[in-house]
Image: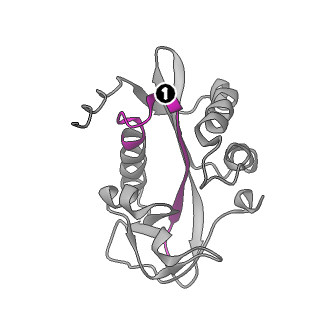
């Protein structure tokens, strides 16, 4: 039996979040993470807390047919012993019915390009290396409490290689 052809990409408009997008992003994030073994169930709340605290530095949505079908959040992080402006990627959410159709890839790529142009030192995340290595993320040198070091990844936009403990903002504490 042969594998099915991949689903075609979905045409979307990637744009910055608007105030009216807050509730659709919340519902989307809940749906995207519902029942996932890797989910803490706090992802939608994290996005709201980042927004409320003013730490949602970059929030991009993918819109299709007038609906928000994808979202990615970037917020400031600290890397102990490393200078420069570092940002964390996540949460990232795509409508479950439209996953694996290029929406997440476009959101991440657009966000990383924006951070790079803005002069950020780099971006870090906790995630699957098989997924995020395609964007240039690598493991090694960073730690995060209770997480296997292979899952703690970064992409540097310059020559600085981060070494130390990755610290997300307080929105991630819940």
| Residue found at x 24% / y 31% | 5
Compared with 24, 159 (above or below) is below
Q: Which image quadrant for residue 173?
A: bottom right
Image-based side of 92 in relation to 171, left or right: left
- Picture coordinates of residue 26, whole percent (x, y): 68, 34
Q: Name the element at disc 1.
A: helix
Q: Is any atom of residue 121 visible in this view? A: no
- Picture coordinates of residue 8, whole percent (x, y): 28, 26
Magenta stretch: give its range.
83-105
| Residue found at x 63% / y 52% | 39
Q: Is any atom of residue 2 visible in this view? A: yes
- Picture coordinates of residue 97, whole percent (x, y): 49, 27
Compared with 18, 41 (above or below) is below
Q: Which residue is mark 1?
A: 97
Image-based side of 76 in relation to 139, left or right: right
Which residue is outermost to the right? 174
- Picture coordinates of residue 41, whole percent (x, y): 71, 49
| Residue found at x 36% / y 50% | 113
| Quarter of the N terminus within the rendering | top left
Does the magenta portion include 110?
no
Compared with 151, 118 (above or below) is above
Which residue is outermost to the left? 2
Which residue is outermost to the top? 65
């Amino acid at each position: 039996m042969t594998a099915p052809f991949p689903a075609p990409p979905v045409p979307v408009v990637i744009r910055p979040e608007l105030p009216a997008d807050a509730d659709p992003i919340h519902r989307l994030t809940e749906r995207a993470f519902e029942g996932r073994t890797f989910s803490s169930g706090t992802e939608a709340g994290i996005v709201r807390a980042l927004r409320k605290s003013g730490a949602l530095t970059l929030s991009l949505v993918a819109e299709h047919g007038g609906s928000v079908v994808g979202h990615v959040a970037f917020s400031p992080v600290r890397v102990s012993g490393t200078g420069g402006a570092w940002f964390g990627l996540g949460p990232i959410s795509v409508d479950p019915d439209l996953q694996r159709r290029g929406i997440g890839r476009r959101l991440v790529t657009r966000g990383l390009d924006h951070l790079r142009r803005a002069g950020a030192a780099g971006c870090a995340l906790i995630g699957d290396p098989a997924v995020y290595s395609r964007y240039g993320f690598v493991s090694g040198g960073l730690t995060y409490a209770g997480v296997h070091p292979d899952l703690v990844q970064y992409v540097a936009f310059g020559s600085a290689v981060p070494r130390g403990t990755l610290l997300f903002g307080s929105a991630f504490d819940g």
